[in-house]
Structure formats: C-alpha cells, structure tokens
Image (cartoon, helix red, strand yellow):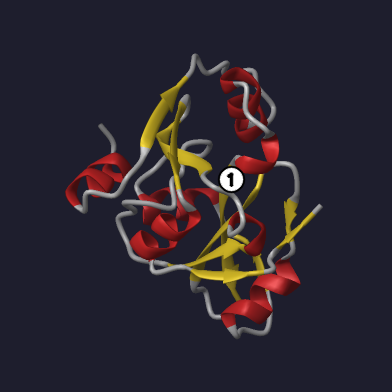
Amino acid sequence: MTPALDLLKKVRAEHRIHSYEHDPKSASYGLEAAEKLGLDPARVFKTLLASSEKGELLVAVVPVVGSLDLKALAQAAGVKKVEMADPAAAQRSTGYLLGGISPLGQKKRLRTFIDVTAQPLATIFVSAGRRGLEVELTALALAENTQATFAPIGRM
C-alpha cells in the first residue's frame, strides 16, 4: 500500500488499482503505464510539480499525451510565474519518488490543479504512488480528495 491508496481506502472513495511491470529504461512513465495497461493515453494523467516565484510548490495533473502550460498554471494559481520544481524539493514535499508522484496522499498539502480535459472522462488514471502502480478513479473523486481546482493548464 501507498499513502495514496491508504487515503482512498480511508475515505471510501471508489477506485481500482492497476499494476504493471515497470521498465527502468522507459523514457515516459505515463506513456509506459498507458501502453502496458492497454489504455487510451488521453485517460492517463501525470503529476507534475511547479514552483511559483514565491517558492510555493503547486501540483499540476495533466494528460500524459500533452504538456503543462506554465503560463496557464500561473494564471490559475494567481501568481506571476511558475517554473518546474526542483526534483529533490518535489520528492521531499510529496514523500514520493519521481515517476511515482501521486496527487493523492502527499506529505504536505499543496495547491492542486487538474486539467479540464479530465472532467468529461468517465474515469482517469493517476499514479498510485509508485512506479508501476496506477489508480483509476473519477476526476471528481480526485479533485475532492486533493482539494483541487479544474483549470485549462495542459497543452497538446
């Protein structure tokens, strides 16, 4: 179990766990998950951390087939600018290793933003807190359990 799965179990959120054999040579953790689980990559979301000009860490959940629009995230967060967070700071703050950072069950509660493309999907997949482990849940359940805001922060 991971902190992400412990949280979902504790709050009794409906979810399904999917695991696969992670290949350490894989260039993209999210695309690897989609491929190995036979999923539409548009339903698989990656968790990225960005840092504002004030040093605030922000969590961005965007489709693995696209990228994070830093300007759009800054606008959604009401800050002047953001940049990708230092990997060591991301790991320290979340308690997860890169490639396995889940938006759920992080050590510190960080402001979280989910790309709007998640809303119309029946379910989405995010990291369950370890490479090779994904959790399937509704975008609304993810938002409720991370106090996230939906915003147009991704770009294809």
- Residue at horizontal 39 percent and vertical 69 percent from the top: 147
Viewer-side residue, 127 vs 150: 150
* Relative vertical location of residue 20 with respect to residue 91 in this rendering, above or below: above
Residue at the right extreme of this rendering:
156
Determine whether, in the image, residue 115 is placed left or right of residue 99.
Answer: right
Q: Is residue 79 above or below residue 95?
A: below
Q: Position of residue 119 (x, y in %)?
A: 58, 59
Label 1: which secondary element: strand
Q: Is residue 116 above or below residue 41?
A: below
Q: Which residue corresponds to the image point at 58% horizontal and 79% vertical from the top-left?
A: 77
Query: Disc 1 marks which amino acid?
Result: Lys
- Horizontal and vertical percent position of residue 136: 45, 39
Residue 139, percent from left and from top = 49, 55
Q: Quadrant of residue 61?
A: bottom right
- Could you say which quadrant of the image residue 150 lies in? bottom right
Q: Is residue 119 left or right of residue 109?
A: right
Q: Which residue in the structure is indicated by mark 1? A: 46
Residue at the spot 62% in from the left edge and 41% down from the top edge = 43
Number of numbered discs visible in the structure rendering: 1
Q: Which corner quadrant holds the N terminus?
A: top left
Q: Residue at x 67, y 31 (%)?
A: 31
Characterize the local packing of mark 1: few (<14), some (14-19) or many (20 or more) Cα atoms within 10 angstroms: many
- Residue 118 appears at what percent x and percent y? 60, 55
Q: Nearer the viewer, residue 86 or 41?
A: 41
